[in-house]
Amino acid sequence: MNKGIYIIMAFMAAMLTGIFSCNNTKSYTDMLKEQKRAISKLFADSGLVLLRSYPANGVFAPNEFYIMDNGVYLNVVDSGNGNRAVPGLTSIVCRFHANILMDTVPYENMSNGSFPLIYTYGQTGYTSQEASMQYFFCTAMFSPLAYVGDSSEVKIIIPFEISSSYYQNKGNPVYYHKMRYRFELR
């Protein structure tokens, strides 16, 4: 009889643990829904317009964005001087102002005291003397280089699915409202 009571008590304890434990992690589907709401809110609040195709003349109005094939939203502010990056040979010095959309946390590395993110075009890693760059670095940051060159400036929104591993885990898209690329040959 005591054995039966212990089994029932153990079963009840397991059931109560299952009922009262909570799982605070968001599902991938929930993160996608939240991201869609955050990007839609940004577009609505800022008067941004989504273009169906890349402008034939390459000129964007300040509020126009085009979605690239990889999902990055792109607005070209200045296409640069015409020099294009060469995979494996061009080091790209990148400085930016960014906001993490669902946290509204701003970040910038454009001031004189901050360090840029340096990326060798076509590679997988980066260099920077600033530890916080690990939160931002992803190759999607450099996908606009298919359209722009040296000394260019763009605005981009990177969905969390193609962002850094940090923002992938958080489910946060990042809006780079000012991104500058400057090239250095290796």
Image (cartoon, rainbow, N blue to C red):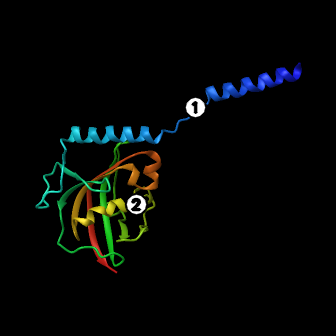
Q: Is residue 24 above or below residue 85?
A: above
- For residue 22, the mark is 1
**Quarter of the picture holding the C terminus:** bottom left
- Horizontal placement of 93 versus 25: left or right? left
Q: Position of residue 93 (x, y in %)?
A: 32, 69
**Residue type, label 2:** Phe
Residue name at image x 18 percent, y 49 percent? 52
Q: Nearer the viewer, residue 92 or 30?
A: 30
Task: Single out the mark in the foreground, 1 or 2.
Answer: 1
Q: Is residue 75 above or below residue 46?
A: below
- Rendered image quadrant of residue 43: top left
Q: Nearer the viewer, residue 133 or 39?
A: 39
- Rendered image quadrant of residue 5: top right
- For residue 142, the mark is none
Identify the element where label 1 is drawn.
Answer: loop
Q: Position of residue 147 (x, y in %)?
A: 22, 65
Q: Nearer the viewer, residue 116 or 6?
A: 6
Residue assigned mark 2: 137
